Image (spheres, rainbow, N blue to C red):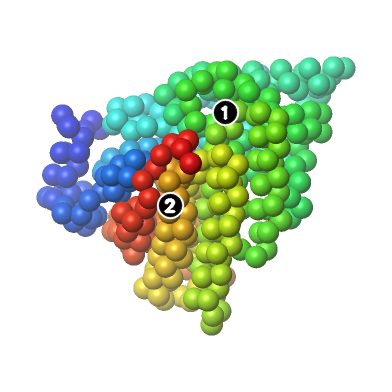
Amino acid sequence: MRKFGPTRRAVVAGMLAAGATGQAAVGSGTPSLQALAAAKGRRFGAAVSAADLSDPRMRALLSAECDMLVCQTEMKWRHLRPNARDWRFGDADRIAAFAGRHGLGLRGHTLLWHHPDYTPEWLHRHDFGRRPIAAAETMLTDHIRMVAARYPQVASWDVVNEAVHHETGNLRDTPFARILGERTLHIAFYTARATAPGAQLVYNDYMNWGDHQEAHRRGVLRLLERFRRDSVPCDALGIQSHLKVLGGPNAGGELARRVKVWRAFLKEVTDLGYDLLVTEFDVSDEAAPGEPAVRDQLVAEVGRAFLDETLSTRRAGDVLAWGMVDPLSWLQGFTPRPDGLPQRPTLFDGDYRPKPLRAAVAAALAQAARYHRGVK
Ligand code: XIL
C-alpha cells in the first residue's frame, strides 16, 4: 500500500492543489468536513470496503475529509464467520491498519446484526444441542469478546443493529431471539461493556422521519426505555440516516412536517438520557426525476434539512457517510432506479468531484450545536 508522506494532511493538500490525483475535489481554501466537525467537538467519517482502499483517489479523499472510518461489511458475522468454527479477519484487519497508519479513528459495525436476513446461513441451521440457552449465550458472548478485543482502538461500537421490526415495532425473530428472547440484546451490551469498557456503546437502527415509520420509531423508543429500566449499558442511539428524496408537488410542506416529527422523536430519545449519532448517512434519489443536476439539488435539500435538525441538539455526536462516491454506493444494487440510471446518493461523484450534498453536509456541520458527550 502506498505511504503518505511525513504529515498526511500536508501531502493530501499538496496533491489536491497540484491536481496530482486527477480530481478537482474540494478547493484548497475550503475547510474539510473533519475540520468543520471538529470545530464543534464531533468527528466526520465514512464507511469503506477493504477493496476501496486500493484506489489512490479514495485514499486521498478519505484522508482529506474524514477522521474516522467504519467497515461497510467486514466486521459483520457473515463476513467474519464462514462457519461456526473459523474466523476471517483479514479484510477488517486491513481497514483497521489503514485507519491506524493515517491517524483515523475506527467505529465498529456491528457486534450483532439482529436481523434474520443478515444472520449467516449456518447460524440459522445451527444445532444448539440439549442446553440451548447456555450454548446460545456462550456463542454470542464468545463472538463479542473475540471481535471487540481484537480492535481495542474502536471508540464506538454498534453493539446491536436493527433489532426492531420496522412494521410491528417488536423484536425481530432470529436464532438467538428464539432461544434467549430480548436477553440476547442485554447479553450483547453487557459483554461489549466488559470487553471494551472505554467505548461508546450504540444501538443502531434505520427509523427515520417518514409517516410509515411511526411503528418503527415507537418500537425503538420502547426498546430504549426498557434498556434504561433494565440498566442495559447502552450509551447512544445510532441513527443510520438512509434518507430518500421526497416526490410530489408539496415536497416542501412535507419536508417541514417531517422535521417536526423528527424533532419530537429525538427529544424523546435524549430525554431518556441517550446520545445520538449519525452512522450511515446517504440520500437515495430513487424517486426523483432523471436530470442529474435536479436530483443533486433535491438530495442536498433533504440531507441538509435532516442534518440541521439532528445536529441542533448538543447530544448529537459523530456523523458518518455510508460511502463517499456515487458509483460505489450500496444503493446502486439495493434500490436501483426504475429508469436504470445510476443513483447519486453520496457526497462525491464518480470523478471524485464534490456534489451539492457535500456542500449541504459542510453547511450543516458548520451550523450544528457543539457536541457535549453525555451532557444534557
Ligand atoms: C450494507 C452494505 O452497504 C452492503 O454492502 C451489504 O451488502 C449489506 O449491508 N444498514 C446497515 C448496514 O446497518 O450494515 C447496511 O450495509 C446498510 C443498511
Q: Which mark is residue 80?
A: 1
> Is the CB of the residue bearing disc 1 within 8 angstroms of ligand 1?
no
The reply, left or right, for residue 234 in relation to residue 347 is: right
The reply, left or right, for residue 220 in relation to residue 293 is: right
Q: Residue at x 52, y 70 (%)?
A: 255
Q: Nearer the viewer, residue 207 or 149?
A: 207
Secondary structure at badge 1 equals helix
Tell me if mark 1 has few (under 14), some (14-19) or many (20+) residues whose alpha carbon lies within 10 angstroms of its own.
Answer: many
Where does residue 147 sit, x and y in percent of width and height? 54, 23
Q: Residue at x 40, y 28 (%)?
A: 96
Q: Which mark is residue 311?
A: 2
Q: Residue at x 42, y 68 (%)?
A: 301
What amino acid is at disc 1? Leu
Q: Nearer the viewer, residue 262 or 300?
A: 262
Tell me if mark 2 has few (under 14), some (14-19) or many (20+) residues whose alpha carbon lies within 10 angstroms of its own.
Answer: many
The furthest residue to the right: 130
